[in-house]
């Protein structure tokens, strides 16, 4: 199976993948480079693919299911280096990275597209679905692009990493309102958005350390929103240091 082993770099760390389905590598484009030898770090077994198949939409192809499943497997490798995939839209504004996170279908992409339309040229997409968060030795957290940019494929796989500035937890609601969360209130949602189910004590400690670094680095807000232009303007005003009132 040597021809199915490819090396992919995430946040500067190499992960060797053995693909179950040869066509899965096409989702990674030029990021997946063939390597010599038979050693690999991650591999989606047929059993794991079948289990993942049960949890994903029926219209997802098997190679797309494998592609999605590789995020968590790769996180098991990356957490050793203080890195992990995180479910969020990440964008760059004023040379810093901001994360919009929530369950799928809550309006993350809508907020980005609204902002892009209302204020052209202000923001760029880093990653549309699962960026890599990296804890550095100085305590800062940096946001890296990844191959996982969502169904809309919004993202720049060559975007330079940016320091994390803030995180917004999105909720749907009848009115637009935003408030700053305490660390205690933010932890459960943030922890659940990391694409990793720790298997070992070292992985638990690594994920806890990364979560702690995120909370020390970035304020966290909760935005209840209608998905309209007013909600996006409220978001922008808040991140700029403006009002936290309802609209």
Image (cartoon, rainbow, N blue to C red):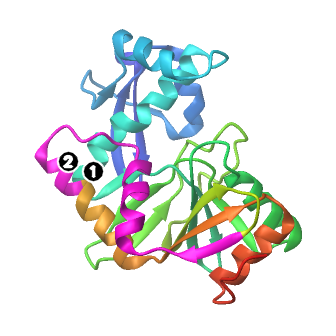
Q: Is residue 226 magenta?
A: no
Residue located at (40% from left, 67% from top): 185
User: Which residue in the rendered view is the most extreme toward the front?
Assistant: 174
Say if residue 155 shows up in the picture: yes
Element class at badge 2: helix
Q: Is residue 41 above or below residue 161?
A: above
Is the residue under label 2 in contact with that under label 1 (CB below 8 Å)? yes
> For this view, does 86 lie left or right of residue 2?
right
Residue 1 seen: no
* Residue density around tag 1, few if under 14, some if 14–19, many if 20 or more, within 10 Å: many
Residue 197 magenta-highlighted: yes
Residue 184 location (% of width, % of height): 34, 69
- The quarter of the picture where residue 90 lies is bottom right
Looking at the rendered image, the disc whose residue lies closer to the viewer, 1 or 2, is 2
Q: Residue 142: which disc?
A: none
Query: Which residue is label 2 attached to?
Result: 203
Which residue carries the number 1 mark? 79
Among the 4 quarters of the image, the one containing residue 110: bottom right
State how many labels appear: 2
Q: What stretch of residues is rendered in magenta?
A: 177-206
């Amino acid at each position: 199976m040597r021809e199915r082993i490819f090396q992919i770099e995430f946040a500067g760390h190499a992960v060797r993948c053995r693909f179950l389905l040869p066509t899965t590598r096409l989702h990674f484009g030029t990021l997946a480079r063939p390597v010599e030898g038979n050693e690999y770090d991650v591999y989606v077994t047929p059993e794991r693919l079948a289990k993942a198949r049960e949890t994903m939409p029926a219209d997802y192809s098997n190679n797309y299911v494998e592609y999605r499943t590789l995020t968590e497997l790769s996180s098991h490798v990356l957490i050793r280096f203080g890195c992990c995939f995180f479910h969020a839209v990440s964008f760059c504004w004023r040379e810093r990275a901001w994360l919009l996170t929530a369950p799928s279908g809550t309006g993350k992409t809508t907020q980005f597209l609204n902002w892009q339309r209302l204020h052209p040229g202000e923001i760029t997409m880093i990653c549309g679905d699962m960026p890599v968060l990296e804890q550095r030795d100085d305590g800062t957290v940096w946001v890296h692009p990844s191959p996982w940019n969502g169904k809309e494929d919004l993202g720049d796989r060559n975007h330079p990493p940016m320091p994390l500035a803030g995180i917004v937890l999105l909720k749907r609601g009848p009115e637009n309102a935003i408030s700053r969360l305490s660390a205690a209130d933010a932890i459960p949602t943030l922890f659940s958005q990391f694409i990793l189910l720790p298997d070992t004590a070292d992985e638990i400690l690594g994920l806890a350390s990364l979560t702690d670094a995120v909370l020390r680095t970035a304020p966290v807000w909760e935005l209840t929103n209608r998905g309209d232009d007013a909600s996006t303007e409220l978001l922008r005003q808040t991140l700029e240091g403006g009002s936290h009132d309802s609209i």
